[in-house]
């Protein structure tokens, strides 16, 4: 990647390392790619497998609105809880738990075997336990992975594979 004007991929290549770029648009897609990384496989196969896993991971997030603005589903006010799927705001609410559930519901409607929940700094204390219980009630076939990401601004990142 490009950090501070330096291309680290180029630096690694100069030192005899092979570098592959895994295209992602969301953090949880990076987690999906890492989950299929197989150090003993040949380089090209690893890049293909990781890219495929990343591209097939659907993603969502919960965001706290910082200012009043227009979204695809209407106007939000500061402090509103926004739920996004694949980068688009799909729900505005006041309850983090309810908005999170609506995002989970939309992500799982197309199926999936693994739901990853990444807890952010601003997540309500009961958000993940309550959401996990609700998911387990809804589906016994979906595996659940909970990660303490500690990210600012996004109380919850979600991924479905």
Image: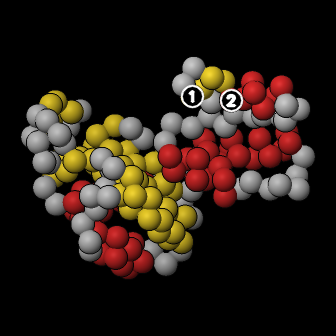
The quadrant in which the N terminus is found is top right
Q: Which of marks 1 and 2 is nearer the N terminus?
A: 1
Q: In this view, does 44 lie to the left or right of 7?
A: right
User: x, y percentage for residue 139?
Assistant: 45, 74
Q: Quadrant of residue 74?
A: top left
User: x, y percentage for residue 133?
Assistant: 36, 78
Q: In this view, does 29 lie to the left or right of 64?
A: right
Q: Residue at x 49, y 78 (%)?
A: 140
Which numbered tag is attached to residue 61?
A: none
Q: Which residue is drawn at 34% across and 37% down?
A: 88
User: x, y percentage for residue 132?
Assistant: 38, 74
Q: How far apart are marks 1 and 2 (CA)?
A: 7 Å
Q: Can residue 43 be seen in this view?
A: yes
**Residue receiving disc 2:** 8
Q: Quadrant of residue 75?
A: top left
**Residue receiving disc 1:** 3
* Up/down of 125 relative to 16, above or below: below
The quadrant in which the C terminus is found is bottom right
Crowdedness near tag 1: few (<14), some (14–19) or many (≥20) residues, C-alpha within 10 Å: few
Q: Is residue 118 visible?
A: no
Say if mark 1 contacts mark 2, CB within 8 Å: yes
């Amino acid at each position: 990647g490009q950090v501070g004007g330096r291309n680290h991929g180029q630096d690694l290549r100069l030192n005899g390392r092979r570098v592959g770029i895994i295209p992602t648009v969301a953090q949880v897609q990076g987690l999906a790619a890492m989950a299929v990384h197989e150090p003993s496989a040949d380089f090209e196969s690893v890049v293909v497998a990781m890219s495929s896993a990343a591209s097939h991971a659907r993603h969502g997030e919960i965001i706290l609105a910082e200012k009043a603005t227009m979204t695809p589903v209407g106007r939000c006010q500061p402090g509103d809880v926004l739920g996004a799927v694949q980068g688009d705001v799909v729900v505005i609410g006041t309850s983090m738990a309810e908005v999170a559930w609506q995002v989970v519901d939309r992500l799982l409607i197309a199926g999936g075997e693994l739901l990853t929940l990444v807890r952010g700094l601003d997540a309500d204390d009961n958000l993940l336990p309550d959401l996990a219980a609700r998911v387990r009630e809804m589906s016994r076939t979906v595996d659940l992975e909970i990660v303490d990401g500690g990210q600012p601004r996004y109380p919850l990142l979600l991924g479905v594979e």
